[in-house]
Image (cartoon, rainbow, N blue to C red):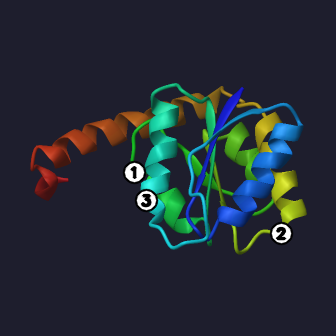
Amino acid sequence: MKICMASDHGGFELKNIILKYLQSKGYNILDLGTDSIDSVDYPDFAIKAVKSILNKECSRGIIMCGTGIGISISANRFPGIRAALCWDSLTAKLSRQHNNSNILAMGGRLIGVELAKEIVDVWLNTEFDGGRHEGRINKIDELAKKYWVKYMEGEHESL
């Protein structure tokens, strides 16, 4: 499994720790930046992960900003992306089982290293349950595509 990782400056340090942790476990990691603690904009790095997933360059992604909120909101703007902001192993597990999340978001300033490792391990090792959840996932993508097209065509007043 190839995993992309991206962060802004607020997630930079935790991203690098988790990147090395996953490499030590044999995962193939694509580091999409940022490369320092210098201030950058999280949407610029969310889109890098999104493109990597949608272009099938990577099968899953891990993204971080200071809280995980901004970068997950940015990633979730795109049909086919299910970025889950997780703060413990249960949210990580359920985001995979019920929502088939393909991007894990965490807050680099809010999550400790050991907890982050636990979250990542659970998230990577939990399978999607499918079943009744599959229809809901498909509905999310159908609605996103439908309303995105309407919005782009200037029909957003009728949404």
Q: Which residue is mark 2?
A: 112
Q: Which quarter of the figure has residue 85?
A: bottom right
Q: Which residue is mark 3?
A: 43
Q: Which quarter of the figure has residue 68?
A: bottom right
Report the Cα–Cα distance between label 2 and label 3: 23 Å
Report the Cα–Cα distance between label 3 and label 1: 10 Å
Report the Cα–Cα distance between label 1 and label 2: 27 Å
Q: Which residue is mark 1?
A: 77
The residue lying at 53 percent from left, 57 percent from top is: 72
Instruction: Please indicate, yes or no, whether residue 36 appears anywhere in the rendered image.
Output: yes
Dot 1 crowding, Cα within 10 Å, few <14, some 14–19, many 20+:
some
Looking at the rendered structure, the secondary structure element under dot 1 is loop
105 relative position to 146: left or right: right
Q: Which numbered disc flags the more N-terminal residue, 3 or 1? A: 3
Looking at the rendered structure, the secondary structure element under dot 2 is loop
24 relative position to 150: left or right: right
Q: Which numbered disc flags the more N-terminal residue, 1 or 2? A: 1
The residue lying at 61 percent from left, 64 percent from top is: 36
